Image (cartoon, rainbow, N blue to C red):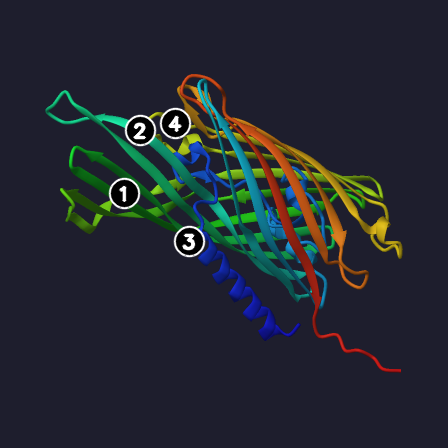
Amino acid sequence: MKINQIIVVTIGAFLGIQQISAQSEALTSSPYSLYGLGVINQTSIGKFNSLGYSGIGIKSSYELNNLNPANYALIPQNSFLYDIGVTGEFNNYSNTSDTEEKSNVNFSNIAFGFRIAENFGAGITMVPYSDVGYSLLGVSSNIEGSTNSFESNVTGLGGLNDIKLNIGYALIPKLRLGLSASFLFGNIEETESFTYNATAFESIEKTNYSGARLGFGLQYDVNEKITIGSTVQLPTSLNGNLKRSINKSLSGIEITVEDESSDTVSDFKLPLELGFGMSIKPIEELTFSADYKKNFWTNTDQSENIGSYEDQDIYAFGLEYIQDPTSYKYGQRIAYRLGYNYDNGYLAISDEKIEGYNFTAGIGIPTSRGTHSMINLSYSYGSKGLLQNVLVKENYHLLSLNLSLEDIWFVKKKVY
């Protein structure tokens, strides 16, 4: 595939994601997306979705690793790597009195990477940073100056995207350093509507956020079987601005109260994030990975109406088995993966942190022996929240399909 073809495909996929995201009801339906920027995305790309989302210390030459930019230094000469993903999610929500089920399907990522020079690689990824999709029905409010009340419906939709440039450079064969630069952007739209007697009221608030963020990564090969890694995401503030439209209808006659009026909104602070990981190959066919991440939300000094932000700990583990990736036998080149992820949460509601966990499993299906292209399928079962007080317990099933492909550039065919 030629360079101009790659660029067209990449831009087309990017625009397709934007269009589908705009048309979709939501990338999530979690009630916890009501707070802050929504539900922050913990998933990755490619095979790492089935490894418990671990991978900071995984050394991989032919797979894009969005968890550690240092790994981009390993992209081979003449190889162009790209990854396109789609996810399907089925959710079940329950509280002390009721249950509800929802599902959605959406594009999850687009990414590509290539080698710039000897020991120097780069790539760009676009993934959802946060997702918003909630509905509050029958919210009761008092009429000011009266003992009467009314019920309104509140819905939220939107989220933020993360476009990230990753650069990796190998100082020496065993030591790789990485730099990532992210641009985060998106909006959250909240609509409140109600009808009281002959009057209908609708308020739409659209909050736009944007900002940049820097990160760093490191990988070091202790020996041929052990690799360790670390990452840092620097704290930053996302600039916010709000636009509000208010309309009401009196006896069927529509009246515009406010039309796209602007208002100030507080910037949203993202915390310092530290990550540590390692991978071990006890035997050639098996790779074990383990990650630990610490996100310092307490230092942002932010809070919600009924909650507060607290420091977050994430533990991730993965296991991959490939009998022989170079074998002529197709079955021996298939990859089998398992993982587990535990997140103690960053949001505390009624002094209860919203913790969650998930189990992952997946398979990597090679497309040909001539390249390292794979179709990566992963499944995740997870749970979040508690059946307690005002909290909601969320159980979900997540299916991911990633086309992790390799294209060979600038190689001339020899004719004998």
Of mark 1 and mark 3, the one earlier in the sequence is: 3
Contact between marks 1 and 3 (CB within 8 A): the answer is no
Of mark 3 and mark 2, the one earlier in the sequence is: 3
Of mark 1 and mark 4, the one earlier in the sequence is: 1
Residue 308, numbered circle: 4
Which residue bears the numbered disc 2? 138
Q: Amino acid at mark 1?
A: Val
Q: Amino acid at mark 4?
A: Ser
Q: Position of residue 24 (x, y in %)?
A: 45, 50
Q: Is residue 77 left or right of residue 199?
A: right
| SS label for mark 3 | helix
Of mark 2 and mark 4, the one earlier in the sequence is: 2
| SS label for mark 1 | loop
| SS label for mark 2 | strand
Whole-number angstrom distance, CA of label 1 to CA of label 2: 26 Å
Q: Amino acid at mark 2?
A: Gly
Q: Is residue 166 left or right of residue 239?
A: right
Residue at 80%, 64% (x, y): give it: 370
Q: Amino acid at mark 3?
A: Ala
Comparing 14 with 272, the one in front is 14
Which marked residue is nearer to the observer: mark 1 or mark 3? Answer: 3
**Please, is residue 277 above or below residue 100 in the view?**
below
Q: Quadrant of residue 412?
A: bottom right
Which residue bears the numbered disc 1? 265
Which marked residue is nearer to the observer: mark 4 or mark 3? Answer: 3
Whole-number angstrom distance, CA of label 1 to CA of label 4: 18 Å
Which marked residue is nearer to the observer: mark 3 or mark 2? Answer: 2
Q: Position of residue 189 (x, y in %)?
A: 33, 45
Which residue bears the numbered disc 3? 22
